[in-house]
Amino acid sequence: MASFMDGNPALKSLSNDLRRRMDQSVADFQASLAATRTGRASVHMLDQIKVDYYGTQTPINQLAQLSAPEPQLIVISPWDPTILKEIEKAIQSAALGFNPISDGKVIRVPVPPMTEERRRDVCKHINKVLEEHRTAIRNVRRDGNDALKKLAKDKKVSEDDEKRALEEVQKMTDAEIRRMEELSQKKEAEVMQV
């Protein structure tokens, strides 16, 4: 779809900024969905965990090779074996319900099957995160609408152009929210699958 705002020099940078901020919100939502636990083991379940590595909080995937060789197991092979205990401690303190087992070389993290109640809790969490990101996109829309009204007030764009641009911003908002809702529904279906 050709963008009216992109064709208008006074609105092009605003359009690009709004699109970039909305895309960032959707990308952030996708990242939090990837870290959401389903019934199967995924290395992304550990994405939010930071390990104290010589005084620096470092993401676990920068300190070790992560793999999920089986549906209910994550294996962590640290590049520096001296940090095994730190990684183990970080996983336990993350309160994800994992109990890591170390053999001195690698850490095995069994992923217990999820109960029905836990699946429902995860779906509630997904909906809460979705609502937070919907709000973020609506805030971007509000900023865009305010900027458009200011441009119209300062006579930098005509009233007709302002009206068309406001409609376009609304369509952009609806499309991004719809995209996130579809991602959310897929993830919920994945979580509820036994």
Image (cartoon, helix red, strand yellow):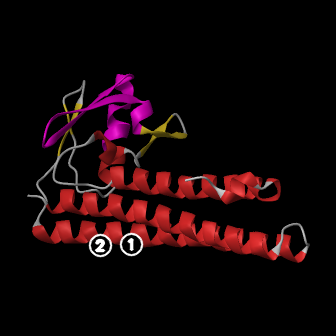
Which quadrant is home to the C terminus?
Answer: bottom left
Which of the 4 image quarters holds residue 11? bottom right
Q: Residue furthest right?
A: 154
Q: Which residue is mark 2?
A: 124
Q: Residue at x 41, y 67 (%)?
A: 129
Q: Residue at x 55, y 39 (%)?
A: 56
Q: Left or right of 27: which side holds 93?
A: left
- Residues packed near mark 1 inside 10 Å, few (<14), some (14 to 19) or many (20 plus): few
- Residues packed near mark 2 inside 10 Å, few (<14), some (14 to 19) or many (20 plus): few
Question: Does the magenta portion include 65?
Answer: yes
Bounds of the magenta span?
A: 60-88
How far apart marks 1 and 2 lie (CA) works out to 6 Å
- Element at badge 2? helix
- Residue 173 image offset from top left, x and y in percent: 54, 67
- Residue 94 image offset from top left, x and y in percent: 35, 54
Q: Left or right of 46: which side holds 27?
A: right
Front-most of 166 and 68?
166
Can residue 76 be seen from the camera position used here?
Answer: yes
Q: What amino acid does circle 2 point to?
A: Lys
Q: Residue at x 34, y 58 (%)?
A: 183
- Residue 26 image offset from top left, x and y in percent: 48, 56
**Which label is found at residue 78?**
none
- Residue 112 image offset from top left, x and y in percent: 13, 52
Front-most of 32 and 4?
4
Front-most of 53 and 28?
28
Question: Does the magenta portion include 155?
Answer: no
Q: Which residue is mark 1?
A: 128
Q: Compared with residue 46, is residue 153 higher up or lower down, i.e. above or below?
A: below
Q: Residue at x 23, y 26 (%)?
A: 104
Q: Left or right of 84: which side holds 133?
A: right
